Amino acid sequence: MAHGSRRMASSGRMVSGFGRIACAIAVMLLSAVAMAQAAATKVQAASTKVLSDSDCLSCHNLKASAKLQARPVSVYVNAETFQPSIHAKLGCNSCHSDIHAFPHPDPVRPVSCAGCHSSQTAAFAGSVHAIAEREKKSRFPACLNCHGNPHGMRAKTDPKSRVYPLNLPRTCGTCHGNPEIAKKYGFPDVYALYMDSIHGFALTSDGLLVAATCASCHGAHDILSRKDPKSRTFRNNVPATCGGCHAGVQVDYLAGAHGTAMMAGRPNAPVCTNCHTAHQITQVNVVNWQLKTVATCGNCHKKRLYTYRDTFHGQVTELGFVATARCWSCHGSHLILRASNLNSKVAPANLPATCGKCHHGATASFVSYEPHPNPHDRRQNPALYYAALFMNLLLLGVFLFFGLHTAMWLARSLMDKGQGARRPPATSAKKDDGVKR
Amino acid sequence: MKNNDSGRYYFRFSLGQRYLHGLVIITFLGLAATGMTLRFSERGWAKWLAEMTGGFGAVLSLHKLCAVLISAGFVYHIGDILYRAIIKKDRSLFWGPNSMTPQPKDAVDLYMMVRWFLWMGPQPEFDHFAYWEKFDYWAVFWGMAIIGISGYMMWFGPFFARLVPGYVLNIALLIHSEEALLAVWFIFIIHFFNSHLRPEKFPLDPVIFTGRLTGGEYQHERPLDYSRLDKSGALEMLRTDPPPRWLQNFSWLITVISVGIGFSLLVLTLIAFWTE
């Protein structure tokens, strides 16, 4: 204060000596009043000022406090994880807005996330998870089930966030990878399937942020049952959902026979998941998957599978080797077109090129080979039908004749042996021989 | 006719015939094992066999290797016949008791044999080749021609499709596999029984491996052949030593392996066929 008055004094150089003294007295008086006022304000603040975060933490950071531990729900806030969390800069009051002073009301009002995150909570309200949450009647916002402790919450782009793409499957897996919970609510235990899939692999072993996680297909807050026509995973919406990443495949699929049938409302038309499965999606160059999908196509194309298995292609595949033609080698995988379509890989005009991929030098004559032969169908391939008939009769004839011949020979020889009668054959044979001639 | 000729040994099969039979045994077993693996590919044993062989590529390569070897044997046999017929002017190859051509006597022998089965008459006297041996021969002959041609058609599909329509390859596979089933079952049931496993011969007739049999056996089994050779004096030309011990053991070894593989394949393919 003295320092301040001296500065004021030196600033009034023009003032006379009396004036100087008068001024100094005035300043000293004013200073005294100001000091008194400041002291008064400080006393007032102790009773009305909003509590600071450090004030709150001075109690809530005491993990070992018996008082905090005795409560039904922990009210412990870890300052170390709270400080770097996304909500730290908002301050405790932003969410716990009913607490202004200490001691505060107990219990405190539950915090609603909707205050800031209104669009997310609105989306959540119509989701499958909200239905389950309503039944649970929890005091806490359902948001925390996935997003975790609100006092340590991170941005979704933060690798420490529970909903960061690389962490999300594990977060969803706490319920969807728990066989007991899965059984209780009647949903499939999909976590393990996902982790073994190409998507799961890309995520866990390659750490790809672009790999599909749960939310990529199911959405985040507005997850609906796949039976709901608005759901991303509703059958008719699956191509668009997968097409979010696999755009080129979606174009091919929609142009192909399966996509056309799906768009036309055919209930049996396959969508992506019918062939690729929903969660256990395998890399297409994995041998076991390549072998298995022959049966997958056969789920619908039963007769085609049956006739395929009778061919060399089918036999080699059946043995467990992929060095031969399987369904999509000829028909394509996503852009599958009917043979009547001129662009189809199996259209008559395109067959030499399609077969020629493996059979170098395939001609128009070569491709009259029937890759789905049915020897029981006389109209499809009469030559094959009659060849099969002839061969069957030949086998039947030979084995009937020699079967009988052998059986009779065995019986006679055994009887001879049993009697020990090994008669020399030459005695009467000549006579009989002569008679017969 | 020597009535007590059991101590002497005579050749019934030449070395060439025995080698050819050996080649057919090895390649036929190889073709059957690899072929039936493909034919019944849906079976666990087939997958196991394919896996143990080293994959489908190895199975197919072995199949083709055996096919080429047995084809070479086939071509050699045809060449041998032509050589004997044209150069050596041996017409007995085509007609007569030493010919493989079915003779009227074969029909009579079959009739007599059936009567013998039914205790209605004595067993017929056989000549150099019995009727069932001729059937074996022709079954293998035509079987090889049919299976061989259809097999090579599939092997070189695009080439053959220039000569015939591609759908003939469908027929080729059907005939190839049906004829193969016929061959495999015929050899492993009928041939094994007729030549080796019937009570008179059980468990094996080593004559095709050693090439020789005793005079007593010869006289008993092929009386007409024996007496003709005896009369013409040719029998003495066929005189030989008893089969050496190693050759007897070798015959046993071949038989045990062949019958083992054959019966395994027979049981597996029969079960697979009836439960198809």
Image (tube, rainbow, N blue to C red):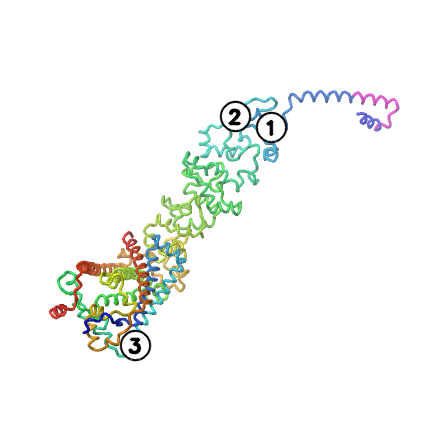
- What chain does mark 2 sit on? A
Q: Residues within 10 Å of mark 1 (few under 14, many from 20)?
A: some
Q: Are marks 3 and 2 on the same chain?
A: no
Residue A421 x %, y %:
17, 62
Residue A123 x %, y %:
49, 34
Q: Is residue A114 above or below residue A208?
A: above
Span colored in magenta: A11-29
Give the residue type that dot 3 points to: Tyr
Q: Is residue A271 above or below residue A35?
A: below
Separation of residues labelled 1 and 2 (CA atoms): 16 Å
Q: Is residue B230 above or below residue A323?
A: below
Label 1 residue SS: loop
Q: Are marks 1 and 3 on the same chain?
A: no
Give the residue type that dot 1 points to: Leu
Instruction: Reply yes or no: does residue A246 show up in magenta.
Output: no
Q: Residues within 10 Å of mark 2 (few under 14, many from 20)?
A: few
Which is the main secondary structure of the residues drawn in magenta? helix
- The label shown at residue A72 is 2
What residue do we see at 17% from left, 59% from top?
A: A419
Left or right: A46, with B169 as reference point:
right
Q: Earlier in the sequence, mark 1 or mark 2?
A: 1
Left or right: A116, with B113 as reference point:
right
Observer-nearest of B261 and B198: B198
User: Label 1: which residue?
Assistant: A62
Residue B166 x %, y %:
33, 62
Q: Quadrant of the N terminus of chain B?
A: bottom left
User: Label 3: which residue?
Assistant: B83
